[in-house]
Image: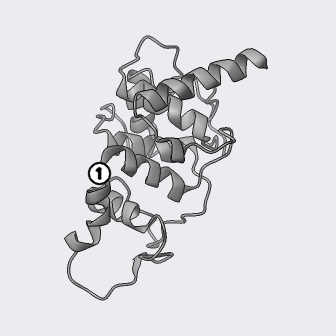
Amino acid sequence: MFISRLLSGIVIALLLSSNVVHAQDVPLDKSAVMTRADFVKLIVERMYTEEEIKHCFTLLSPSEYQLLFTDVSIHESYGPSLCVAMYTGIVRGYEDGSFRPNKIINFAEASKIYTRAFSLSPAAGHSVSDPWFKGSVEALASRGAIPMNVKTYAQQMTYLTHEEILKRITNDLTFLDSQTYDSLAIVR
């Protein structure tokens, strides 16, 4: 346990020093799970300037709209970040027009967002019968970006797992042990 905490501390220190995450984004309990809104906000803040995020609403068509999705007001604290994610195609929401911001994000959903956000090419050659997330998971696996602590597609994302995946994507750490699409068990 001590070694695990020590290594976690070292990883966090490296991430903070390399600007992969900002100190205010790291909760005290890094094993805490992430909501969809928290996850998207962290991704967008990692990729865009504060100014770009703040002015996203001006890029949308002029309107008196109050909702980004059927369940997200433009006045939410994560609203500007979600605006950027929508505008750039990082997120699309659900078929019913909702985003479900307070739902805990799982690895399959996160893999799709990572792939879009970092322009990782999904693996080719998929059939329509494949799960919607297969190409995204394979794209992450090809970069060595799926930590060994990820055990299933349905696993809830924690801040620590998110930080580890970001570190692997942005630093091209393909030599690290990584899960693959086939090594993850499908939990329905």
Residue 116, given in percent of the width and then of the height, sits at 33, 45
- At label 1, counting other C-alpha atoms closer than 10 Å, the crowd grade (few under 14, some 14-19, many 20 or more) is few
Q: Position of residue 69 (x, y in %)?
A: 43, 73
Along the horizontal axis of the image, is 5 left or right of 11? right
- The answer to whether residue 184 is left or right of residue 87 is right
What residue would you read off at disc 1? 49
**Relative to residue 178, is residue 57 depicted above or below?**
below
Q: Is residue 125 visible?
A: yes
Amino acid type at mark 1: Thr
Q: Identify the image quadrant of the N terminus.
A: top right
Residue 49 lies, in percent from the top left, at 29, 51
96 sits to left or right of 118: right
Asked if 52 appears above or below 77 in the picture, the reply is above
Asked if residue 138 can be seen in this view, the reply is: no
- Measured as percent of width and height from the top left, residue 125 is found at 31, 32
- Give the residue drawn at x 58%, y 21%: 10
Q: Quadrant of residue 52?
A: bottom left
Does dot 1 land on a helix, a strand or a loop? loop
Which residue is drawn at the image coordinates 51% and 19% (left, top)?
178
Q: Residue at x 62, y 37 (%)?
A: 186
Identify the residue shown where x is 46% and y is 38%. 21
